[in-house]
Amino acid sequence: MKFVTLYIGGVEKFFLRVHYVKSHPSSDPDTFDVVLTPEQMTGIDNFDIVEIKKDGNTEFYGFVEEITPEIGEDGLEYTISGRCWKVILWKKWTERYQESREVGPYDTENDVIESGFFGSVNPTELLKFIMRCPMSIHPKDRIRHKIGWGISSEYWTYCTNETADCFYPDWVGMRTTGLSWRSRGSVSYLNLINLYVDTFDVTYTGWKVTGASPYIDIDDESDYISVDGTSPATDLDEGYFGFDDLPATAVNVYTAILYVKCKLGQMGGNGYVEVILNDGITDYNLGRLPYSWGFVYKDFMVQSVLNTTDKVNNAKIYFRYHFNGQFVDYTVSYAYLKIEYSTTNDSDVYQHKDDYFIINLGEPYPRVTGILLECRNNAANYARNYNIQYTSTADCCAGDGWTDFDPPVIVQNNEYRDILHSWKPKDDVHCIRIKLTLSADNAWEISQAYVWQGDEHNYRVMHEV
């Protein structure tokens, strides 16, 4: 016979009846109910911890959710019911950390624009973040705020020691895609150049060609490559097509866009054409070209692939026609890369030790527990070495007074584009600062910032005080 003991709020209780369900594995929380006498109800409150043991081994761990008085055979009794610890995680999914915007960057491997809320974060940090049960301020009457976005950014202010031209600090809380803050650089350092097709290496020759090689080097619709209804009923490749090189003075690539001019001549089924980009080492499928009866331009954001001068100079593309059961007539007449680059060295635009970015939350908040700093406009420009701290002082841009969270957030050689960290919930947090602790050979950007409070203590999975 098993010996069953019951603890509620850490105190052993003598029960009349106890029942619980264990339906592992299941995403839904298991349930329990227990009947107590009035004498055993002393000190019990909603969401107290309930632990049921058999012969000293924990069989069930959950929380009080309902207390119901009833008249039993021997008089007044109390039925206490609730669910197991999974109710905490189940409850937190209602926060809905969902991203309805196409925030990017472009995912060349899966042919989609990245749209997940947390982007590319450290998975261990994400687990700790969820376990600390962050909560969001209700979005009612708040223009730039949604459930899951933590503390509303409408009243935040910002300060930095350096800000690049046309990359404003306010943009990190605007909840607008395509904008970001950058720490250093001037528009006078940035250059735009079009790199046109200049070679055709005949690696693949499955398409028809018209005009002079390399066929798609100038915006002339009399020179082109094409597939049509007389082509063999099979997949066909054409390429590689190489591009002009960057100037020798180029040292850093900021944006890279591939433009392709194309048109659909006739469509007899579900055939389509894809573009494959090679950076000198690896092929990346950029996705399909559009269906259009007249010539149109299709642009592909490719800076996540062509993020160095060497990769740009080695870039080449080919086209893949998928027969897919029935033919299409398709023509490509022109292609080029549009590159934004700098000719400065790292002392001008790269990450510098002691550069910082400060968020003033507008007022002190209790139980502050986490932060997300996105870098989704240029996937290479995230902080590599940094320390995240807080202060309770409203005038946080004036000087020192910064304190580490518990545990401290000090990171070296960061490999994660989007910076997510959490800590034990901290009261009276007015400002948060991220400060670089070492220099690095990349620019530093933040596209969006989010800050969360932790839920009330009884509603957290991690027991921290």
Image (tube, grey):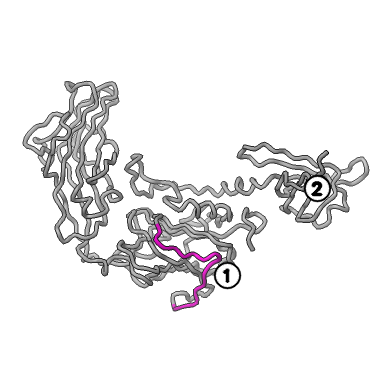
Give residue 351's position: percent from left, percent from top: 33, 66
Camera-nearest label, 1 or 2: 2
Question: Element at badge 2?
Answer: strand
Amino acid at pointer 2 = Thr
Residue 130 drawn in magenta? no
Q: Quadrant of the N terminus?
A: top right
Q: CA distance from mark 1 to mark 2?
A: 41 Å
Please tell me how crowded label 2 is: few (under 14), some (14-19), or many (20+) other residues with Cα within 10 Å.
some
Q: Which residue is mark 1?
A: 428
Residue located 26% across and 25% down the image: 323
| Residue placed most toward the observer, 127 or 160 | 127
Residue range corresponding to the magenta coloring: 398-414
Label 1 sits on what residue type?
Asp
Which residue in the structure is indicated by mark 2? 5
Seen from the viewer's position, the closer of residues 152 and 398 is: 398
In screen coordinates, is 130 left or right of 76? left
Residue 219 % position (x, y)? 12, 42
Q: Earlier in the sequence, mark 1 or mark 2?
A: 2
Q: Quadrant of residue 183?
A: bottom left
Quadrant position of the C terminus in the picture: bottom right
Residue at 58% of width from left, 56% of height from top? Answer: 132
